[in-house]
Every structure is written in C-alpha cells, then in structure tokens.
Amino acid sequence: MTSHEPFGARLRRAMDERGPLCVGIDPHASLLAEWGLNDDVAGLERFSRTVVEAVADRVAVLKPQSAFFERFGSRGIAVLEASVRQARAAGALVVMDAKRGDIGSTMAGYAEAFLHEDAPLFSDALTVSPYLGYGSLSPAVAMARESGTGLFVLALTSNPEGHEVQHAVRADGRDVAATMLAHLAAENAGEEPLGSFGAVVGATLGDLSSYDLDINGPLLAPGVGAQGATPADLPRVFGAAVRNVVPNVSRGVLRHGPEAGALRAAADRFAQEIRAAVAGA
C-alpha cells in the first residue's frame, strides 16, 4: 500500500538525499550483446536484475523502458513486474517509460495498469503522450492524484520528428509545447515542495529560454551521456528550473555492465557531476 504522499514530495526528497540522477533500464538487443547475454528472457532477467541490484539503493529514480520488456510477451512483462518491485523495495522511485496516450476508458485502463496501487506494474510515475489533446490525460491525472503517483508528459522531446507537432503554432500564437507546459503549471499550482505532474524536456535541445519551464514540477531530461548532453550543459539548457531537472542517463551507465561495481561507479560519477552542476547554477 502506498502512503499516498504525493509523488512530487517523494521525488523532491529523493533528489535532495540521493541527487537527481535517473538511470534508464533499457535492455535492448545491442546492450544485451555487449554484456555477453543472449537476446532472450533469461538475458533480459539477468540484465534487469543486475542494474537494479547495482544502483537502486543509491539513485533517486530508475526508468525501465517498457518496450524492451514487452517484446518478450508475458514472460518479459513478468521480468518488468519483478524489476519494478525490487527497485522500489531498494528505495528508488520508478518512472515507467511507456508513453501511453489514449482517450476515455482506454486511458483509464492504462492509468490503472501503471498507477493503481494494487496493479502488478504499479510505478511511482508514468510517461504519457498528450497528443490526443491534453484533456485526454484526465483519467491518468485523476488516478495519479488518488494514488500519490505522478505523470511525465511529453512536451519538448529531442527527436527531430517531434518538431512538427510540438512547435506547431496555435491560433493564440503559442506553440503546442508551451501549451503543454502551461497545462502542467496549472496542475501543479500551489503544490509544495514540488508538484507531481512533470514534463519530458530533452537535455540536448540547447537554449530553451523562450519557454517557461518553471512549472512547479519535475522535468525529466533524457539525452545526458551517450546522446551528447553533459551535466555541465544542464544550467544553460534549463536556466532557473534546473533544480527541478531529473537528468536521465541510460547507455552512459549501462555500457559499463555487466559488472555491478562498474555500474555503481558510473552512476555515482554522473550523480556527483549533476549535483555539482546544479549546485553551481
């Protein structure tokens, strides 16, 4: 049973105590091969268990990428369920990276799958896509408020294809990404110490000063490490909102496996560099 303490409060505490690093659990075929593992359920289980055992007791957030588990069917989902339970038991918050988005009862079903406290895949937060309209997320917002969980809404993603949707300009002159950020600011209004409704904003996007990133909520920032962004870049990209940034590193940590000690050392190094960059901002 969850305490129903809001996700934002739990995340703020975890970031302050452990540093703001989020480590991805991305068991795609090439990484399994690099670790000397077979691209099968046994390799998936070994990979995921190793990452969780190595870093779940020291990082603020672990972010499993659901797709890499789903591709193995029900046995892969069973590994994902175990990984989520083990990570949360070790003190890490789990952000399920499933990028769900739909309408009505279907969106409610996705919310129940990941955000209901009795669900086998119950996670602390879920990534969601708002591009059926922000209002389509209402069932997930309601479930998150009820269960003390959170959402990370795709807002300014780093993939080039995202530009045609996220930078489309509305009739009021504001682009779609800015509209999503404004919705999230409204969700988080008055919440202390941090709201539970965050945005996904790529760390590789450069100057974002034209956007109001101060949404009183967390900013999940993929792109640090192998994709080219560095901890030192964070203050320049996120400005005054940098204290609420949760930088995600996946391959930058995972490529050091399968040795648990090397994974821990890489996570500790990134965490220290990120903490120093944020403190110096």
Image (cartoon, helix red, strand yellow):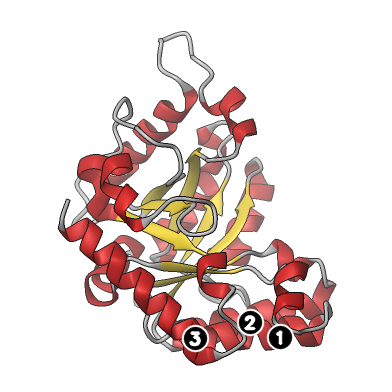
Residue receiving disc 2: 48
Q: Nearer the viewer, residue 188 or 38?
A: 38
Q: Is the C-beta separation of discs 3 and 2 under 8 Å?
A: no
Percent across and percent down for residue 90 are 43, 88
Q: Residue at x 41, y 83 (%)?
A: 265
Which residue is situated farthest in the left direction here? 280
Looking at the picture, which amino acid does disc 1 mark? Glu
How many other residues sit within 10 Å of disc 3, few (<14), some (14-19) or many (≥20)? some
Residue at x-position 68% and y-position 72%:
27
104 relative position to 154: left or right: right
- Mark 1, Cα crowd under 10 Å, few <14 / some 14-19 / many 20+, is some
Q: Residue 21, percent across and down?
A: 37, 67
Horizontal side of residue 161 vs 267, given as left or right: right
Question: Which residue in the protein does label 3 denote?
Answer: 262
> The residue under label 3 is which amino acid type?
Ala
Helix, strand or loop at disc 3? helix
- Is residue 195 in view from this perspective? no
Q: Nearer the viewer, residue 94 or 209?
A: 209
Q: Quadrant of residue 210?
A: top left
